[in-house]
Image (cartoon, grey):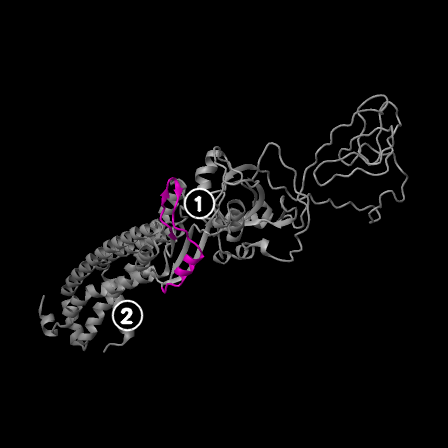
Amino acid sequence: MMPAKNLVRMVVANTLRSPRHFILSAFGIVIGIGAFVLFLALTQRAGSVLEKVFPVEEVRVVAPSVSLLGKDASKRLDDTTVETIRARPEVKSAVPRLSLAFPAAGRGSFEGSDLKFEVGGFADGVDPNFVRDDDRIRELFKDWDALKDDPNRVACVPPPPDPYEDVIHPPGAPPKAKKPRDSAWGDHPAPGAGSAPTSPAPGSAGSATTPDTGSASAPTTGSATAPAGGTIAPAAGTSAGSAVVPAVGSAAATSAGSGSAAGAPPAPPVPTKYYNPCPEPDRYYCDEAERICKHRVPVVLSATVVELYNNQFAKSHGLPIADKDLVNLLIQQRGLSAMRFSIGLGNTTISGTAKMSNRRPHRVEAVIVGVSTRAMPVGVTMPIQYIKRWNEAFLGVEAASSYSAIIVTLKDQKQLAPFSQWLIDEQGLRLDDNIGERFATVVFVIRLLFLIISVAILVIAIINIGHNFFIQVSERRREIGIMRAVGATEGDVQLIVLGEAAVIGVVGGLLGIGLAVGIGMTWNAYAASNIPRFPFKPESWFEFKTWIWASALGFSTLFCILGGYLPARRAAKMQPAQALAQN
């Protein structure tokens, strides 16, 4: 038996000695492995994108739509239905979803643009424990109204209504006070301390001057203050016959008339800007109905909503483009208040909507806390407790307990068929039209087709390698005869030929992988600059996973060894005398 070191040296030397044979044998392997890797990487990426658009590991259970005299008579999905589904052995979890069942209008701003949108019909609620995408969502996505002893839930005065708009913008936080400049001695001088009194300037509290009388003033016993309602009132405690000058700005103003100030009609109060009075205004707002500070309703969006906004809404309305990274960046840099918006419960942006409730509209504030795969595909999702309370307040108890769907996660996707049949036969329910499952089937068929093409190319390469090695064995009969004559065994000869085939497989496989990666990078560069943006357009069209590379290298080596087996066996069976005697 030839030592392994000598065997390797001879295999490498024989391979390098005949480059023409090496190129002819490796060409088919390079093309076949390149196609194998490229097709697998392409279908792998297609599957990844499909899972983002349509999560195929979960199914959506709904009640078949039934209409009776124009009214919805579909079967109700309630807590009993949820518990029945959870009891099934193939079910891992069942989570109900509840839609907002009455009109609601949203209003907010994004990068300076005023946005008005419909929330009713495009919002639902889900158990907060079901939405666990990242740390921020896990912390903020919960029912804040259920928390007891919240120190920030203090009494407050809500913002004044807007006579021109049903839903107002969520008020902002008050501006931060500027830090006073230090004096030359490093101390902040106290107002009025250590300095001569100066005449009051226009706008100082407690005085009013008229240009005609020169020094006539309106004495006051108090200072005018701005009530929480958002306006400035005249100073209280004016003496009889003195000029009542409406306070503007800091509670005093100069009289605009001439002559005596007595008897001049008071000017109407000038409204001031309302600021959020709540502690932590980044997260809390003043509720108009209860007049206490509440945490904003946490909301998550789906990637589908962001894509639809970018491609359908933002472009046609001249609005800024947003994406998941931008949403997260704005929250990190500007705080949660950057993604706040108002929801007018009972209001609507759609004209002609029938009135569904006699309850007075109620404005609440919400905040986007992140982008989640668990969110409603087209709409917003919030904790289900909020939706239950709102549905009950506007429509009654039944609307708060009738779920719109149940998200079921199965222990094994292979059990989907029997579970679906059980829903139809015994529960009168069905699975929602699972487009994702259909697309997954299409991707599977395409992947299988690509694999068949790759394997066909590799089979042709095997035949080519076998043909080339048969020719090479015939050309090297005398060499093989000499090796047998000097003591090489049949096993040694066979290992030499199979070793040369393995080297061709390894090198051809590496070149094929390199070819596939090169084609993939070229296509990615072309697609980035020439193919328009569309929903869920991937940054890379190929996903070259490690298992794809490893399997490609293994297949190329294995197929080359299979192609070289019969020629190696024939070479090993040659008799030395017969091989040397042939020309």
The image shows residue 480 at horizontal and vertical percentages of 16, 70
Dividing the picture into quarters, in which one does residue 582 lie? bottom left
Please state which of residues 127 and 2 is positioned toward the viewer in this rendering. 127
Which region shows up in magenta? Answer: 61-89
- CA distance for labels 1 and 2: 65 Å
For residue 96, side relative to residue 574 (left or right) = right
The image shows residue 97 at horizontal and vertical percentages of 45, 52
For residue 88, side relative to residue 396 (left or right) = left
Asked if the stretch drawn in magenta spans residue 269, the answer is no
Circle on res. 378:
1
Choose the circle earlier in sequence order: 1 or 2.
2
The image shows residue 264 at horizontal and vertical percentages of 81, 24
Asked if the stretch drawn in magenta spans residue 66, the answer is yes
* In contact (CB < 8 Å): disc 1 and disc 2: no
Find numbered disc 2 in the image and state the secondary structure of the residue it sits on.
helix
Dividing the picture into quarters, in which one does residue 273 lie? top right
Q: Is residue 344 above or below residue 143?
A: above
Q: Which residue is mark 2?
A: 9
Please state which of residues 321 and 244 is positioned toward the viewer in this rendering. 244
Q: Amino acid at mark 1?
A: Val
For residue 502, side relative to residue 245 (left or right) = left
